[in-house]
Image (cartoon, rainbow, N blue to C red):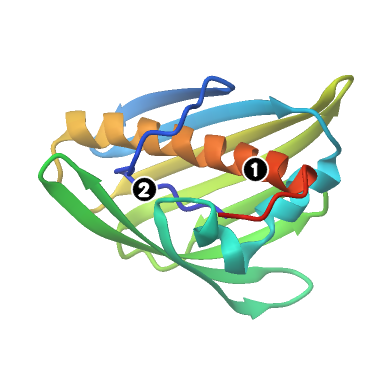
């Protein structure tokens, strides 16, 4: 599950999410974010690997479907629609995903339609009080949008992504249905 849009929808309260963005120039960005949650790695893993249902709890995604699955990798097609001010853009990625169960998910876009590169990882680490979830993404966009808008929207949507994943982990732990 790697898709992050450059534009988000409604803001999600994300006081429990930390997100840092580095603008490396020429449409290239590096994001690093994290959140902490009470629970076990299994709780987070079940949400992050629910590839076919991600769009039900991540507001920026319109489509997420597994195209191929082997013991070594998963091919995951994702599509998102983002809006910020007067700009809107449909983003498509074909993620090659590899998993280290309950510890790490690596992803890389092999479609190269909207990004010259788009790669990152989710890391799950047990701590004394629960689980720390780390998210990393490096990307370079191929589409034209003013950098100030792209940069701010990317950070906002990545923060929302982590907040929505965190909320879904909590919702499932409490036994509440997904909205």
Q: Nearer the viewer, residue 147 or 43?
A: 43
Q: Gap in Å between the C-alphas at discs 2 and 1?
A: 16 Å
Q: Image height check: is 4 above or below 151? A: below
Decide if residue 91 is on the left or right side of residue 143: right
Q: In percent of the image, x 86 and y 38: which residue is there?
A: 40
Answer whether labels 2 and 1 touch (C-beta < 8 Å).
no
Q: Quadrant of residue 133?
A: top right
Residue 131 picture quarter:
top right
Is the N terminus in the top left, top right, bottom left or bottom right quadrant? Answer: bottom right
Q: For the residues carrying marks 2 and 1, which lies nearer the camera in this image? A: 2
Please name the residue that numbered disc 1 is placed on.
122
Give whichever of 43, 18 is nearer the camera: 43
**Which disc is residue 5 wearing?**
2
Front residue of 12 and 27: 12
Residue at the limit of the structure toward the left, as seen here: 86
Residue 67 visible in the shown view: yes
Q: Is residue 173 above or below residue 147?
A: below
Q: Nearer the viewer, residue 44 or 138?
A: 44
Residue 179 drawn at (x, y percent):
55, 54
Q: Residue at x 80, y 28 (%)?
A: 38
Residue shown at the point (75%, 69%) measured from the top left = 72
Please, what secondary structure does the residue beneath circle 1 have?
strand
Q: Residues within 10 Å of mark 1 (few under 14, many from 20)?
A: many
Q: Circle 2 sits in a helix, a strand or a loop, which is it?
A: loop
Q: Residues within 10 Å of mark 2 (few under 14, many from 20)?
A: many
23 versus 178 height, above or below: above
């Amino acid at each position: 599950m790697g898709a992050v849009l450059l534009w988000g929808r409604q803001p999600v309260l994300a006081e429990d999410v930390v997100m840092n963005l580095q603008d490396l120039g020429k449409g290239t960005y590096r994001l690093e974010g994290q959140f902490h949650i009470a629970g076990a790695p299994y709780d987070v893993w079940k949400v992050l690997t629910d590839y076919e249902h991600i769009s039900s709890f991540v507001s920026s995604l319109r489509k997420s479907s597994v195209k191929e699955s082997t013991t070594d990798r998963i091919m995951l097609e994702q599509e998102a629609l983002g809006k910020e001010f007067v700009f809107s853009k449909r983003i498509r990625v074909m993620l090659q995903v590899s998993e280290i169960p309950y510890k790490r998910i690596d992803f890389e876009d092999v479609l190269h339609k909207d990004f010259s590169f788009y790669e990152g990882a989710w890391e799950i680490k047990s701590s004394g009080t629960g689980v720390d979830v780390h998210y990393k993404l490096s990307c370079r966009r191929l589409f034209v949008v003013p950098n100030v808008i792209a940069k701010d929207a990317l950070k906002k949507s990545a923060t929302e992504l982590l907040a929505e994943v965190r909320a879904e982990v909590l919702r499932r732990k409490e036994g509440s249905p997904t909205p």
